Image (spheres, rainbow, N blue to C red):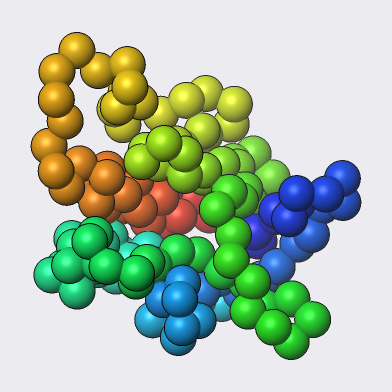
Amino acid sequence: MKVTTTFWTDDIYEFTELLYINGRTKEVIFRTNLCDRFETYKFFKAVSKFVKSSTCIDSYNTKQWYQFAVVRDFEVEHIKWFDLVINDTMTISHDIAFETTMIVKNGIAVPLGKFPMWADKEQPKYREFNLKARAYKYIANQVWSRK
């Protein structure tokens, strides 16, 4: 298993370690070695629980934020989109845009909700965190069910 991302360039970078960090301080909250399937499953389950915790929800109105990161050139770098290559036949693409977490599995969008600007009614205050929790739980289950 590996993570690929572009860092807004034409080059594709591959990593076997994924982090979930405090975006302002770069403090590592969770870390996983993608070569270990069970560890990666636990990582995404932990992130799913964390985004619904009071620590994360309280960051909604502060200057704190939490996101994924990788270590590149001995420095922690934020990533907003990445492809999680689980095996030769399954790739899950993750992207955060417009307060929505988008998941694409092998080129097919996994519906987790509409973009908020296209919704017919006002959205719940913590919708973003609920969507993230569902997305990360989905990724954890996909990691565990594939060999």
Q: How many marks?
A: 0
Q: Nearer the viewer, residue 110 or 65?
A: 65
Q: Nearer the viewer, residue 87 or 57?
A: 57
Residue 74 coordinates in the image, percent (x, y) = 74, 87
Residue 42 coordinates in the image, percent (x, y) = 35, 71
Which residue shows up at 22% across the image and 61% down it? 61
Q: Is residue 112 left or right of residue 34?
A: left
Which residue shows up at 31% across the image and 49% down it? 132
Quarter location, residue 18: bottom right
Query: Which residue is situated farthest in the top direction here?
Result: 120
Which residue shows up at 58% across the image and 49% down it? 81
Q: Nearer the viewer, residue 48 or 1?
A: 48
Q: Is residue 89 left or right of residue 112?
A: right
Q: Is residue 87 left or right of residue 9?
A: left
Q: Which quadrant, please, contains the N terminus?
A: bottom right
Q: Is residue 147 left or right of residue 7?
A: left
